[in-house]
Image: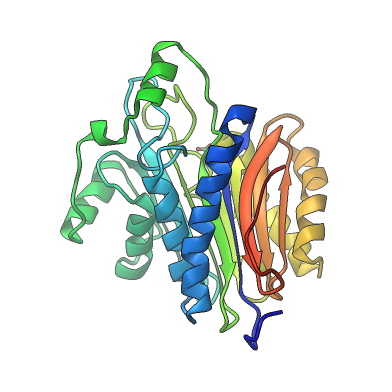
Amino acid sequence: MSQMENPIAIIVHGGAGNIPPERYELVQTGCREAAARGWAILAAGGSALDAVEAAVQAMEDNPAFNAGRGSVLNAAGEVEMDAGIMDGATGQAGAVTLIRHFQHPISLARAVMTSTHHLILGGEGAEAFAQKMGFEPVPNDFFITERRLAQYRRRIQAASADTVGAVALDAAGHVASANSTGGVSFKLPGRIGDSPIPGAGFYADDRFGAVATTGQGEHIIRAGLSFLVMRLLAEGQPAPEAAARASDLFRIRVSEGEAGWIVVDAEGNVGVGHTSQNISFAWRTSDEDDFVTGIA
Ligand code: GLY
């Protein structure tokens, strides 16, 4: 452990699915940059909530990922994004769905948490709220990259690979979780996945740790995947073991379906698990001098 008295940790994911080997370097670099953004905040004594928001913002700005700019297109050839965030200290959460015109859905989710009495805002209401809060709208085209347009035109099912998330523990002992996604390609307009649903796409509780999931949202919601992992943490499993054991619990409820998850526990251990072919991730804890990146 470093000189810091209390442990800190962050782990980010860049999506679960079938990641082609030629994209390994790109997504690992993106994950590492995002983790580094969050780590800098934690190392300076900042909050887990700020760290996960900053990490996810970095990935929303990176067109390599299926979140923010670079999101997959729906059946109508447009981008609709979901995001959610949770503060393990207070148990408060915020989420947005069907966002079409704002660059950082994760920051809208945080604004819902801190500036409304609601937990989830969707569609036009969420966008009206964003404008009222001073967020600058951009055209929907802003989010559409050449790669996603080519996939759409060639009817390539990119599924939900490359969706993004982060969980962290700060030096004050607080955890937080954040997730952001363009969802699944060719989804029906109006479809909402797991990413903005607490207990499915994300969860954070200072007593135990925090979880963020990725993969096929319909399966993740049905399984309550984040709660499944939280249950293992609550039983006293450290994050690596909880992450490893979660596949069995997921499979009891959902026999098919690709999913992945990242975990931090209250002691600052991290873990990653998946039923999908791959999941990309990067982490750093007080036990490491550098970032660990990988495609599992
Ligand atoms: N996990 C992303 C989605 O299904 O929307």
| 210 lies above or below 281 | below
Going by the image, does 237 lie left or right of 207?
Answer: right
**In this view of the protein, can residue 21 be seen by the observer?**
yes
Q: At 78% across and 44% down in the image, what residue appears?
A: 247
Q: How many marks?
A: 0
Foreground residue, 288 or 221?
288
Q: Extreme top residue here?
A: 154
Q: At 39% across and 12% down in the image, what residue appears?
A: 153
**In this view of the protein, can residue 92 be seen by the observer?**
no
Q: Position of residue 197 (x, y in %)?
A: 51, 50
Q: Position of residue 232 (x, y in %)?
A: 78, 61
In what quadrant of the picture does the N terminus appear? bottom right
Q: Position of residue 119 (x, y in %)?
A: 41, 59
Foreground residue, 84 or 274?
274
Task: Report which quarter residue 15 is drawn in.
Answer: top right
Going by the image, does 212 lie left or right of 58?
Answer: right
| 82 lies above or below 23 | below
> What colour scheme has been applied to the protein in the rendered image?
rainbow
Task: Report which quarter residue 211 is drawn in.
Answer: bottom right
Foreground residue, 224 or 272?
272
Q: Position of residue 144 (x, y in %)?
A: 32, 30
In what quadrant of the picture does the C terminus appear? top right
Going by the image, does 280 lie left or right of 183?
Answer: right
Q: At 62% across and 49% down in the image, what residue appears?
A: 281
| 52 lies above or below 30 | below
